[in-house]
Image: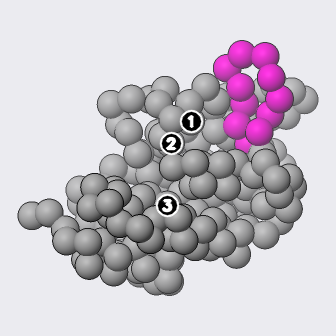
Amino acid sequence: MERTPEEARRDYRLALELPFTKLIGRAGSGVQASRAGDASTGWRIPGDQAEALRNWGVPVFAPDKPDSVLLAGAVQAASGPEIESHDLVGYRLGRFWEHTVAAVEPDGRVVGFPDELGDVVPFNSSVRAFVEIAWRWYFAQSALLVLYAADDEQLGPMLQDAIDKAHAIDPCGAAQDPDDWWWEGVIGTW
């Protein structure tokens, strides 16, 4: 059964306003996520960061398109780091377009390592913030698709609300480069 625009607006608000654990509890079995296994207990990042990956994982926006412009969660199963590049060591969390998304030792910040030459892109100041923003955007985006199809005129302000929520969850991540923060680009250019 398709959602009406009114239901989509309600779901969008819930995606931004519900406490995170309640939002995830509403996900149901139809949502695909990539979670970290027990090997992540050996990752050299803060324990609560790896725990967020074990408990909630990373949503898979486009399971059949791992190199799309949508986030494809693909958390590594190995206990050792898979990525050593740009003087950083990291654990793979997934893919986004032409980047491998990873949690970096020792602090757990999340960056995108380019497939080709280029700079590392800062995503979030912590895995926990990355996981929460990714899930909130996953649910918000599904509601926005309904509103986009209905030609709803509130999309612009709603996208700004989502960007503001991402800033509230991770003000340090957003402050790294406020004019070129990854989430602002993902949400704002949706």
Amino acid on which the number 1 mark rests in the picture: Phe
Amino acid on which the number 3 mark rests in the picture: Trp
Residue 52 can be seen, yes or no: no
- Residue at x-position 60% and y-position 68%: 160
Give the extent of the magenta segment. 108-121
First along the sequence among labels 3 and 1: 1
Q: Residues within 10 Å of mark 1 (few under 14, many from 20)?
A: many
Q: Which mark is residue 71?
A: 2
According to the image, label 3 marks what residue? 137
Quarter-wise, where is residue 167 in the image?
bottom right
Colour scheme in the image? one colour
Q: Position of residue 118 (x, y in %)?
A: 80, 23
* Left or right placement of residue 119 versus residue 135 in this view: right
* Left or right placement of residue 104 versus residue 102 in this view: right
First along the sequence among labels 2 and 3: 2
- Residue at x-position 85% and y-position 62%: 175
